[in-house]
Image (cartoon, grey):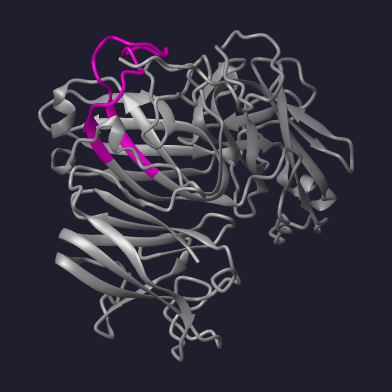
């Protein structure tokens, strides 16, 4: 077991038990708030009566997101007319709220629990009168810790005649901080046990003398990762779940930088990890050897309640990883070839630095389409035995990235061998058999950095057994 240091270096999302005190930040946020144009439900009556009165209600769609928590009240205000509806006991005008199953949950306040994200409908009596008046509406969600989150939407005043089409809501303007542009999960793999013992099988960081099982993920874009959940199933073993949510009873999923032994979790297990350009992380969980026979469902939660999910299949086929196999962080003073995994004879190197050629087949996107600018050609040599399943090139001094990974947000990289394209024509992935040495040509669109002096780019080649071979390119 290696000595571990808990590093608390990020602003942590407030996660508390249901009876926690006042928090420094809201327990969650209103991710979506809009008026439902086509609805004729009648759940709210006049005043504080939750009963049908023959008048269709005004329906609002509300999505609340956050790592975990509980709601204590909903309040709806028309900021233009000053009218107000609420779920609170004794409110002048009742606001009826239903969950995603359509069940009224007013009697469940002040403790309506949610995990990650939840959808609700809010109903205010007399749709015709509300739409006729129009105005700017604000929904305020109060959490059990006393914090609140709000969002707004506007209804243009519409005639109140029977059967008249009401005005649609404009795009809501959330009072909370806007969500980031979004990071994408571009790769994930189960690596097997070995390397570190960071979790003792409880919700706390600790050791039980059993090597943790490791997962590696790569994220690209800009956002903040605030939650991780790993669910194992199949293989004849019981289903099991690990996560970083402080309020669940699931054992902890420990997050580190790729292959490293320093947890990025806070003391309560929660995380708030900035993602900028490209970031590689390892996830560690305590478990038995049965995990090598199971499949996994990986869920990542980002700011704003946005979720990325993927299935990791055939876990037993993945190669185990050791801590000294970790993918190193590029260093300006180290231009030696970087290799990970067990096949040390594998290597990748640059044969010729990027030069502009006469072809124009790729652009500033994922499309194989001329952009009006001639492409750059980078020639590399790959050595080893196996099949190359992905190639990427990432700028180490900026945000530029090109790859062959389907679904990636990076710009497209076309690969040629003997002047013939080897990418799959549909998703532009690659599967290139290598026996010994092979020379490949990478065609990419210049983002303004390829022709610069003192450039630094990380070239990564992923093999069919999950191994990654890298080299830091300079020119």
In the picture, measured across the screen, residue 222 lies left or right of residue 155, that is: left
Q: Position of residue 386 (x, y in %)?
A: 14, 59
For the point 54% across and 21% down, the residue is 7
Q: Is residue 338 visible?
A: yes
Where is residue 174? Give x, y as percent.
Answer: 73, 43
The one nearer the camera, 381 or 191, is 381
Residue at position x 78%, y 42% in the image: 137
Q: Quadrant of residue 190?
A: top left
> Left of 64 or right of it: where is 458?
left
Q: Is residue 42 left or right of residue 420?
A: right
Q: Could you say which is closer to the camera, residue 51 or residue 278?
A: 278
Predominant SS along the magenta part: loop
Q: Which residues are magenta?
A: 190-217
Image: 300 above or below 286: below
Q: In the image, residue 162 lies at what x, y percent?
A: 72, 56
Residue in the picture at 72% in, 19% down? 24
Residue located at (78% from left, 45% from top): 130
Quadrant housing the N terminus: top left
Looking at this view, name the residue that lies furthest to the bottom.
358
| Residue 157 placement: quadrant | bottom right
Residue 114 included in the magenta stretch of the image: no
Residue 226 on image: x %, y %: 53, 32
Q: Is residue 49 above or below residue 44?
A: above
Does the rendering let one see residue 94?
Answer: no
- Residue 334 vs 104, above or below: the answer is below
């Amino acid at each position: 077991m290696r000595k571990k240091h808990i590093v608390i270096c990020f602003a942590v999302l407030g996660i508390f038990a249901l009876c926690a005190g006042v928090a420094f930040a809201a327990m969650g946020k209103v991710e979506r708030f809009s008026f439902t144009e086509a609805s004729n439900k009648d759940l709210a009556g006049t005043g504080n009566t939750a009963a049908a009165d023959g008048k269709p209600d005004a329906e609002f769609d509300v999505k609340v997101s956050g790592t975990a928590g509980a709601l204590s009240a909903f309040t709806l205000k028309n900021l233009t007319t000053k009218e107000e509806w609420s779920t609170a006991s004794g409110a002048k005008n009742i606001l009826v709220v239903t969950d995603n199953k359509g069940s009224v949950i007013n009697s469940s306040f002040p403790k309506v629990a949610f995990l990650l994200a939840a959808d609700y409908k809010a109903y205010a009596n007399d749709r015709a009168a509300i739409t006729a008046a129009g105005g700017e509406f604000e929904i305020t969600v109060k959490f059990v810790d006393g914090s609140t989150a709000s969002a707004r939407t506007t209804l243009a005043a519409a005639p109140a005649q029977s059967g008249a089409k009401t005005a649609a809501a404009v795009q809501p303007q959330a009072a909370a901080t806007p969500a980031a542009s979004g990071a994408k999960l571009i790769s994930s793999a189960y690596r097997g046990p070995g390397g570190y013992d960071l979790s003792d099988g409880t919700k706390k960081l600790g050791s039980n003398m059993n090597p943790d099982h490791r997962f590696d993920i790569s994220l690209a874009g800009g956002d903040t990762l605030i939650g991780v959940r790993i669910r194992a199933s199949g293989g004849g073993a019981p289903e099991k779940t690990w996560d970083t949510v402080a309020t669940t009873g699931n054992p902890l999923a420990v997050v580190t930088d790729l292959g490293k032994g320093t947890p990025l979790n806070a003391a309560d297990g929660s995380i708030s990890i900035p993602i900028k350009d490209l970031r590689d992380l390892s996830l560690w969980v305590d478990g038995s050897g049965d995990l090598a026979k199971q499949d996994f469902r990986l869920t990542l939660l980002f700011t704003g309640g946005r979720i990325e999910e993927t299935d990791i299949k055939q876990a037993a086929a993945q190669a185990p990883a050791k801590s000294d196999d970790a993918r190193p962080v590029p260093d300006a003073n180290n231009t030696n070839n970087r290799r990970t995994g067990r096949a040390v004879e594998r290597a990748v190197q640059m044969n010729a630095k990027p030069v502009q050629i006469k072809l124009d087949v790729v652009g500033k996107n994922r499309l194989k389409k001329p952009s009006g600018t001639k492409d750059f050609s980078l020639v590399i040599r790959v050595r080893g035995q196996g099949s190359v399943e992905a190639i990427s090139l990432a700028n180490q001094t900026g945000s530029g990235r090109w790859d062959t990974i389907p679904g990636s947000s990076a710009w497209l990289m076309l690969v040629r061998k003997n002047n013939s394209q080897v990418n799959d024509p549909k998703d532009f992935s690659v599967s290139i058999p290598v026996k010994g040495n092979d020379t490949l040509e990478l065609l990419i669109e210049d983002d303004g950095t390829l022709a610069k002096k003192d450039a630094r780019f990380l070239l990564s080649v992923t093999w069919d057994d999950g191994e990654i071979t890298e080299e830091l390119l300079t020119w």
